[in-house]
Amino acid sequence: MNQAEPPVIANGIVFAFASGENTRQAYADRGLFDKSSERIKNSTHATLYALDGETGKELYSSGDQIKSWIHFGGLTVANGRVYIGTYDSVLYCFGLPGR
């Protein structure tokens, strides 16, 4: 996972996501000189994963459905849905497997 964030567990399913955010702040050619605009331009999309809590088997991946990255975000699970908000202010909603 590219920049994995803390998971959430619901109904025996582990939900985790890769934020897609480029967090590199030190560069070989210029040290710590960095700007957020560079990190934004080099970030990719977030990816949500659903994993079987017992086996770790991947049950679902959002692939490239999420179009932006996440900065200091997290997952919310409620009423059979998983919610995740991105840097560009889009709220994504995914149904729990088997629902």
Image (cartoon, rainbow, N blue to C red):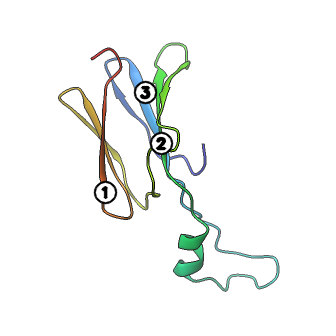
In three-dimensional space, the C-alpha distance between marks 3 and 2, rounded to whole angstroms, equals 10 Å
Q: Is residue 75 above or below residue 3?
A: above
Secondary structure of residue under mark 3: strand
* Mark closest to the chain's N terminus, 1 or 3: 3
Mark number, residue 14: 3
The answer to whether the residue labelled 1 contacts the one labelled 3, judged by CB atoms less than 8 Å apart, is: no
- Asked which quadrant contains residue 93, the reply is top left
Relative to 8, is 63 on the left or the right? right
Q: Is residue 40 above or below residue 53?
A: below
Amino acid type at image mark 3? Val
> At x 43% / y 27%, what residue is drawn?
14
Q: Is residue 9 above or below residue 56?
A: below
Amino acid type at image mark 1? Val
Mark number, residue 17: 2
Secondary structure of residue under mark 2: strand
Amino acid type at image mark 2? Phe
In the image shown, does 3 or 88 lie closer to the viewer? 88
> At x 54% / y 46%, what residue is drawn?
4
- State the count of labels: 3
Give percent across and percent down for residue 13.
40, 21
The residue identified by callout 1 is: 90
